[in-house]
Image: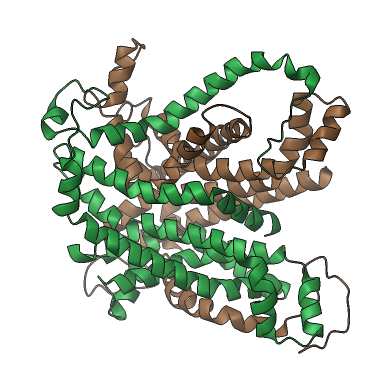
Chain colours: A green, B brown
Amino acid sequence: MSTPASVIAPAEKRKRKYYLIPTYFAVICYVIFLGFPFLWMFTTSLKSPLELLQLHQTLLPKGLYWQNYQDIIEKRGLINSAKNSLVIATATTVITTIFAVPAGYAIARLKKVFSGAATGWILISQVFPVSLVIIPLFMAVRRVGLLDTIWGLILVYLVASLPFALWMLKGYVASIPMDLEEAGAMDGASSFQILRRIVFPLLLPGIVATALFTFLNSWNEFFFALVLIQSPEHETLPLTLARFMGSEGQVLLGPLAAGAFLATIPSLLVFGIMQRKLASGLLAGAVKG
Amino acid sequence: MSTVTTKKAKSSGKGKMYNRGAWKYAIPAFIPLLLLSVVPLSQAIWTAFTDNVAGFHVKVKFIGLENFHRLLGDKLFWASFKIGIIWAVSVTLLALVLGFGLALLLNQKLRFLGLMRVLSLVPWAMPPVIVAIMWNLLLRPTSGPIQGILEFLHIPGAKTDWLGDFNTAFPTVILIGAWVAMPIITVSILAAIQGIPMDMIEAATIDGANAWQRFRFITVPAVRAITTALVALNIIWNFSSFGLVFVLTAGGPGGKTFVPALFAYNEAFKYGNFGYAASMGVVMALAILLMLGVYLKASKREDTQR
């Protein structure tokens, strides 16, 4: 799998080194474009408040000021917010997956009318600006008494993630040959057995990809959390981080950078490991959808 | 349950249904969607036809198409609407070009590949709110590092206030938008490229196809489907979101980056004109659906012509 698609023919091998100069130039440009903000954030997180106040900033910190990390973890409730975010994102992912897998299967296998209507709704729910749905949604959450609770946010994230999860899973199901289900049905498998024994195992890579998408979107989500969460003990990570940028943003730059760096690392790790699965997930949803 | 009588049309994926009970499986997902997506969305659409304004005990009444009529003559909104389309299309195309290029590089045998792979995911892994704050800090006049570096390198125009200047604000925001959108595009296109069977490339090489021809006739067709989907998704996501722009420029300077999602947000939450704002949302949703319809139809036609 890892062999590059552009294999170089022997005749071209001699020419190859001339390609290398522009290629590596492009590599350097990409590394700077993608990496510089991240590097800057990391070095900023190691600077002392005094250093950050100086007019001429150096890229490398003058000393390693780990206080920022200590500060953000101990004083500013980052651990608690991270815990909230973890709970919310995990619960959202688990519930979304449990709901979306059978439903995605149903949408993919139903008659065209139903499947078309479902897909149409998925599309509409994506194109309508979130900022306007937030008022009726806020009222609905308040009515069921879940305002400013972790469960309220989980419920909203579930609804926000379902359309895209359904869309992805639908694509995966469509790529599973019907013959297998036919064979199962002929052997007398019940409807649920077909889903559980035949479709589910084949769908597993797609489920993993969908779950990752859901997890990451909930982990990073800001707008719903801002509107639905009020008390600090229920804050999610993005909310806590955004608070450092208030009117006194400059003063809190160090802790902000430290928090941002810490918040990025877990998803970066998961991504690094799972990126192939993620990509194939989007691919399936797109091609077979 | 096993009343299978025909074996036709099994490869098409539609047609005969072997799992007749499948519709029941949609119910658990359908109920929360109905309560928290269909209902609020319908309410929001309904609001567009009322004179709903913020405040307690204000009687809401149905006013038909009045909001839309007013919107039609709202020059500010249409200016913003134009900015929104330019924004969504430019971000998408720029991210597509940059992401495609990066995917091609990641597919080569090069040094620092591992580093590049991880870096290509950074914008995705970072919480969007942090991305916006970070770029805001990076681009700050005088204290931001980007100005410092440009000055150090003696690049003309180093002192530009990239987010505050009339001419540079919008292109800068678009570039950052592309930075955010790149990873999904890169990763998906890379996967599509790596899915190309090796024998196909070898065969083409033996037949005397050069690098450009292999790219044109093997790589491009292989990524066509995923590219279509990525373009559609990115246009949807970018046209209806405003978080990035909100933190970076808040619509300024002089409305140069005032995207319509932000316009509608302000109309609702700053001025309390819920009904009027909702009508903007409806117009935006319709515009996106129309754009997507045209785009998907065009790319389908291109597909069948091939």
Where residue B105 sits, quadrant-wise, is: top right
Residue B73 visible from this viewpoint? no
Task: Locate residue B133 relative to residue A103 in the image: left or right.
Answer: left
The x and y percentages for residue B241 are 42, 50
The x and y percentages for residue B84 are 46, 43
Task: Locate residue A205 relative to residue A34 in the image: left or right.
Answer: right
Task: Locate residue B75 relative to residue B290 in the image: left or right.
Answer: left
Question: In this orientation, which residue lies closer to the viewer: A34 or B141?
Answer: A34
The x and y percentages for residue A262 are 30, 47
Task: Locate residue A178 relative to residue B155 in the image: left or right.
Answer: right
Give me the residue at 50% from left, 49% from top.
Answer: A273
Give me the residue at 54% from left, 48% from top.
Answer: A275
Where residue A15 sits, quadrant-wise, is: top right
- A113 is higher (above) or lower (below) than A253: below
The x and y percentages for residue B226 are 65, 47
| Picture mark count | 0
Image quadrant holding the N terminus of chain B, namely bottom right
